[in-house]
């Protein structure tokens, strides 16, 4: 093997994708990068064999590799963990590019740590690199919080009783990582001075922690950027070359474009399904209709669900399906007209998606569809529109008017989607 990533579980790793893309951009030929899952016994054999030119190291081996090394650079020594190794004539040298990756994340978003109190959530391998950056940036107080109050960390109870004056929070724990995306390691509303949240978790795009910070109008920085930055620095070590950091933003934009969902909201018969299928063809993102997913999950039609379980029963299934859909990537998702009535649906769908409100004049909406029990009359439709319209506006990242030329509406959505992604890169 020439290059690769070793770890215990690599099923959701983006490292190969990023490394391959860097090689393409920098025109490095025959760049081979593999993902190698190793258990404890396989890890020992792999390291002793040294059959590689360069490797990245992830959980749980960032410290376990150290006894096999002949040399470590300054960052790796200071941090006490290694995530990059090169093999030079049988001699192994270790590096830690997590330091540079996190420092880039901090600098790119103008996060000022000097004189501030920083809480670091989690006490694993990534914590050491983050702590080193915080020290480098002259943070006044650095407090490590972990479920196990040991190895220099405090417990969550002590955090909530003594450190609610933190200025910055960094999550290095796996809390909120796919597939368990419902959780956040802390409740940001408890912190009275909090000005910034940084999360090293990169899947989902927006973790629950970052989402809650965003909702509270607190600066949040997503983990995808650190992942790409450390990969860039790794590539430079592997190939003994250097290139501009602008490649990080370029790849971040590409990955957001490839991974981010488009979530269509709006009244029944506003055109969500038709527009969704047109977007599927235009963008190459697979189309899903939440109503179809509800029917499949329940094994019965929507009118049958309403007849047997009422609206409350239908909404319960809708929320279950919305949570399932929120874990998907690179999809077009059309929601039912009432999905916005329950905040939890929209909170989940926005973790991996950009919401587009398909706004259609009420006189162009259908009020006699037997598959839509709540909009079976003109009067019911008008009342529904009055109640829901403010919620569509509240949850929309963009409003697309669909009253005339639907092709123009689709083009408008595509342009808005790309514009929002560009803003996300600069955010």
Image (tube, rainbow, N blue to C red):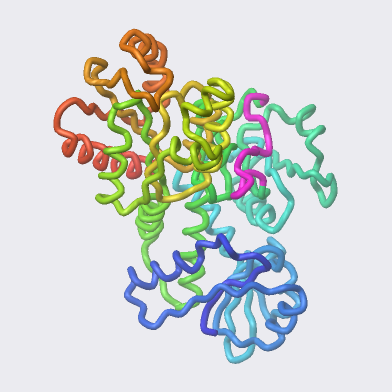
State the residue at coordinates (30%, 29%): 358
Q: Which residue is the extreme one toward the left?
A: 405
Tell me, yes or no, if residue 112 can be seen here.
Answer: no
Prevailing secondary structure class for the magenta stretch in the rendered image: loop
- Residue 46, position as x, y percentages in the image: 68, 82
State the residue at coordinates (71%, 47%): 122
Q: Is residue 53 left or right of residue 153?
A: left
State the residue at coordinates (69%, 55%): 128
Name the one closer to the observer, 198 or 179: 179
Which of the 4 quarters of the picture holds residue 312? top right
Quarter of the picture holding the C terminus:
top left
> Please, is residue 24 above or below residue 89 in the view?
above
- Residue 51, position as x, y percentages in the image: 61, 87
Which of the 4 quarters of the picture holds residue 247? bottom left
Quarter of the picture holding the N terminus:
bottom right
Tell me, yes or no, if residue 94 can be seen here.
Answer: yes
Q: Is residue 297 a member of the stretch shown in magenta?
A: no
Q: Which residues are magenta?
A: 175-190
> Please, is residue 42 above or below residue 97 in the view?
below
> Please, is residue 77 above or below residue 133 in the view?
below
> Please, is residue 368 above or below residue 414 in the view?
above
- Residue 300, position as x, y percentages in the image: 51, 36
State the residue at coordinates (42%, 33%): 335
Name the one closer to the observer, 43 or 378: 378
Q: Which residue is the extreme one toward the right?
A: 150
Name the one closer to the observer, 13 or 379: 379
Q: Is residue 338 left or right of residue 61?
A: left
């Amino acid at each position: 093997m020439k290059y690769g990533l070793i770890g215990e579980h690599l099923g959701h790793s983006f490292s190969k994708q990023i490394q391959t893309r860097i090689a393409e951009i920098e025109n490095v030929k025959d760049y081979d990068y593999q993902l190698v899952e190793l258990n404890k016994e396989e890890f020992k054999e792999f390291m002793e064999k040294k059959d590689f030119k360069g490797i990245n190291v992830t959980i749980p081996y960032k410290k376990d590799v150290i006894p096999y090394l002949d040399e470590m650079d300054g960052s790796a020594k200071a941090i006490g963990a290694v995530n990059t190794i090169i093999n030079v004539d049988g001699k192994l040298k270790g590096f830690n590019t997590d330091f540079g990756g996190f420092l880039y994340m901090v600098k790119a978003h103008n996060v000022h740590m000097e004189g501030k109190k920083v809480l670091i959530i989690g006490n694993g391998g990534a914590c050491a690199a983050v702590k080193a950056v915080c020290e480098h940036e002259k943070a006044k107080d650095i407090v490590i919080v972990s479920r196990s109050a040991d190895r220099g960390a405090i417990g969550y109870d002590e955090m909530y009783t003594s450190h609610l004056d933190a200025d910055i929070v960094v999550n290095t724990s796996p809390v909120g990582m796919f597939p368990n995306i419902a959780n956040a390691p802390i409740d940001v509303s408890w912190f009275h001075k909090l000005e910034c949240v940084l999360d090293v978790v990169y899947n989902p795009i927006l973790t629950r922690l970052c989402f809650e910070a965003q909702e509270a109008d607190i600066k949040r920085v997503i983990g995808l950027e650190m992942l790409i930055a450390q990969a860039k620095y790794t590539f430079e070590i592997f190939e003994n070359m250097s290139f501009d950091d602008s490649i990080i933003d370029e790849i971040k934009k590409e990955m957001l474009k490839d991974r981010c969902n488009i979530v269509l909201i709006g009244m029944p018969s506003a055109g969500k399904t038709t527009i969704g299928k047109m977007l599927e063809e235009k963008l190459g993102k697979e189309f899903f209709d939440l109503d179809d997913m509800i029917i499949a999950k329940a094994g019965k039609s929507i009118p049958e669900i309403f007849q047997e379980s009422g609206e409350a029963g239908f909404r319960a299934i809708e929320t279950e399906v919305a949570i399932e859909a929120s874990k998907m990537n690179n999809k077009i998702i059309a929601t039912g007209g009432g999905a916005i009535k329950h905040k939890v649906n929209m909170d989940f769908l926005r973790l991996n998606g950009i919401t587009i409100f398909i706004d259609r004049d009420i006189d162009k909406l259908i009020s006699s569809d037997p598959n839509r029990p709540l909009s079976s009359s003109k009067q019911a439709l008008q009342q529904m529109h009055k109640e829901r319209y403010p919620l569509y506006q509240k949850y929309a990242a963009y409003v697309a008017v669909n009253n005339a030329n639907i092709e123009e509406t689709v083009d408008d959505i595509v342009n808005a989607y790309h514009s929002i992604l560009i803003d996300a890169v600069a955010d």
